[in-house]
Image (cartoon, grey):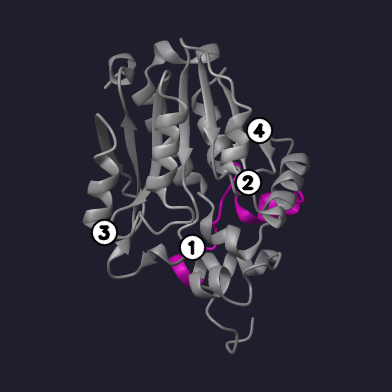
Amino acid sequence: MSDELPAYDRELLLLGAKRNAVLDLWEVQRYGSDSYGDTDYVSVYGMRPDDWHAKGARLLGRTAVECTRDRLADAIGKEVAAIAGSRLLGARTQVVDLFAGSGNTLYWLLRHLPGSRGIGFESDAAVFRLTRHNIAALALPIDVLNTDYLTGLAGISVGLDELLILFIAPPWGDAFDRTSGVDLRRTTPPITDVVDFLLYRFSQNHLLCAIQVYEVVLPVSMAELRARFDWSTLRIFQLNTPGQNHGILFGTKDGAPQVIAT
């Protein structure tokens, strides 16, 4: 590749000219190399970029940045399963990814929660089209609908004896700052608004919220979010350079903590 090409970084792929472009394999690999020193950084669906690309899967520039790559999605799935507890697996567990994107997190959640029902929602038409294409090309055992989370949740039925696991990772957009980290009140939509709706909509159900966060978070935004739960715990996954790692904030309300293995 020419040395005159721009750096393949977050700004170019998420906010710049490549945001809505379907990336070539070399571009996916260059993003991994330029940003993380790893051409295989955007490994998804249990495959390296050259493998999933060869099978016909494709990603937009913004999805390559915002997707939860395999190492992180695998760690999230294991932690969710550990928090939920083995006695709540199977038919009594329902998993919903409110902002599914590539569907990779949902894929790994269901791998670690065998027998669970699962569905994802993706409101962006362009992202959804490629995700559905990837699901078909790779024969993935997941289901993603082209709808926003409010409309999608209206069709969800949850039994009183079921555990509902909700993965919450709305686009960060300009909520992320390299110095101050993520302001959880400025995601699209704000995570606090999402959680307020969920706690109201499923007030009679056993609910486990799993919220993707960053190692560096604006403290006031984290405090405001955790105040909404009766019980919460934070897990940071040490997979990148210190200060650049992702994590999960788990939260429950009302009687849910009594049915969760801690």
How far, Cα to Cα, is label 4 from label 3?
A: 34 Å
Circle 1 is placed at which residue position?
Answer: 38
Task: Please state the total of marks drawn on the protein image.
Answer: 4
Circle 3 is placed at which residue position?
Answer: 218
How far, Cα to Cα, is label 2 from label 3?
A: 27 Å
Image quarter hosting the C terminus: top left
Q: Which of the two marks, 4 or 3, is nearer to us in this view?
A: 3
- Does label 1 or label 4 sit earlier along the sequence? 1
Q: Position of residue 176 (x, y in %)?
A: 39, 64
| Bounds of the magenta segment | 34-57
Query: Around disc 3, counting alpha carbons within 10 Å, would you say few (fewer than 14), some (14 to 19), or many (20 or more)?
Result: some
Q: Secondary structure at mark 4?
A: loop
- Does label 2 or label 1 sit earlier along the sequence? 1
Circle 2 is placed at which residue position?
Answer: 122
Q: Position of residue 32 (x, y in %)?
A: 52, 64
How far, Cα to Cα, is label 1 from label 4?
A: 28 Å
Task: Please give the label number shown on residue 142.
Answer: 4
Tell me whether the residue at label 1 lies in contact with that at label 3, contact meaning CB atoms closer than 8 angstroms. no
Mark 1: which amino acid?
Asp
- Does label 2 or label 3 sit earlier along the sequence? 2
Quarter of image, res 142: top right
